[in-house]
Amino acid sequence: MAEQNDNATEKPTGKKLGEAHDRGQFAQAPEIQVVAGLLASYFALLFTVGPQSKHIAEFTTSLFGNLEKYQITSNSLPGWIMLAFFMLGGLTLPILGCTTLAAILAGGIQSRFKLTSEVVGLKFEKLNPVSGLQRVFSKDGIIKMVLDLAKFAIVGSLIYSGIKEILADPIFFTPVPVFRIGQFIYDSTLVLFFRLAFAMGALAVLHYVYQLRKTEKSLMMTRQEIKDENRQAMGDPNVRMAQRAMARRFMQKQMLADVEKADVIITNPTHYAVALKYERGVDTAPVILAKGQNLFAQRIKAIGTKREVPTVENKPVARALFKYGEVGQPVPAQLYQAIAEILGYVYRTHRYYFHQLKARRLTQ
């Protein structure tokens, strides 16, 4: 685990949490799965063993009460073994199934049911004996050893106290019916499982809380790290500026290419120039093909002069079109009347140009 920076005061971002999860770096306590298995075994014993045990007891009573009717031979022995196997399976499989499912669910809840891809791979540094010794004598190694000793002590003390209580039961001092022995074993097993689950549960909670705080602290970030991550996500500023400049050049090139298809160029006359087109049956309103100011406006007018595009000087309309209009979009509605008057004027005075323009558009 990487050494922590004293300046790491910010909560980890979603990106860092995801990367840490892929490395298997998230809060987890193996004791939780142990507790889940114990509880699953407890409830499986509670709800399934009783009926199965009764069935086995009835079968056993019937078998031993009628031994003279059964003959055990080499031919019948496999059948008896198979029968015993199915009875034992009916008794143990529910417990094994519940325990396995509970352990999987407990592990999935801790990992939020997400796969940790990097954990699966082989890491050769873990085979290094020096690194192994460092992990053993590190803070985490010592805490793990303390937890293991605590688990050993808990299990040992519970087994010891359980044995004392079991040995004190009257079953060891007075005659009891045969069925009482089975009931005694069943009750003692349930009590022992419940005690183990309760004690291990308390230890699991403490361990998980410690792991959660430790993981959160190890993933804390500095403000600079967050800024760097945001910068990487958004891209290098220089690259973004270059991309915007390239997009701007491409757009200007496209606008200049479209000027020759314009119906009219409206100018300021020196500061602004806006090229418009209107095709009957195609456009619902006049469309802005190009707009520019200062040097770029001069380039628009130069192309318009070369291609004989009608040019009209109208300072208020040129300024309004440049300020409020968007290239490739219809002109603002508030300018419809003014634009209609300008187009009507150029249509009357430049009939030959529009005859050429119509042919030009058909060939493109």
Image (cartoon, rainbow, N blue to C red):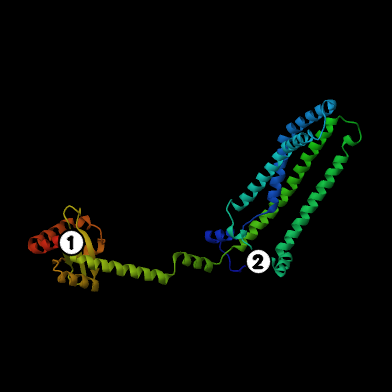
Residue drawn at x 40%, y 68% as measured from the top left: 240
Q: Where is residue 64 in the image (x, y as percent from the top left)?
A: 84, 29
Q: Up-down: is 194 above or below 26?
A: above
* Image quarter of residue 2: bottom right
- Give the label on residue 27, or none: none
Q: Kindly identify which numbered label has been placed on residue 363.
A: 1
Q: Name the residue under label 2.
A: 124
**Which residue type carries mark 1?**
Thr
Marks 1/2: CA distance? 69 Å
Q: Residue furthest right?
A: 173
Point out residue 279 in the picture as x, y percentages from the top left corner.
17, 56
- What residue do we see at 90% from left, 36% from top? 172
The residue shown at (14%, 57%) is 340
Left or right, 58 with reference to 26: right
Looking at this view, is 148 or 294 the one in front? Answer: 148
The image position of residue 312, as x and y in percent, is: 14, 66
Task: Tell me the quarter of the image containing the C terminus.
Answer: bottom left
For mark 2, does the 10 Å Cα neighbourhood hold few (<14), some (14 to 19), or many (20 or more) residues?
few
Residue 199, position as x, y percentages in the image: 75, 48
Quadrant of the frame with the N terminus:
bottom right
Q: What residue type is labelled 2?
A: Phe
Q: State if disc 2 and disc 1 touch (CB < 8 Å).
A: no
Q: Can see residue 24? A: no
Looking at the image, residue 68 sits to the left or right of residue 345; the answer is right
Q: Quadrant of residue 72?
A: top right
Element type at mark 2: helix
The correct choice, above or below, for 68 with respect to 141 in the image is above
- The secondary structure type at the circle numbered 1 is helix
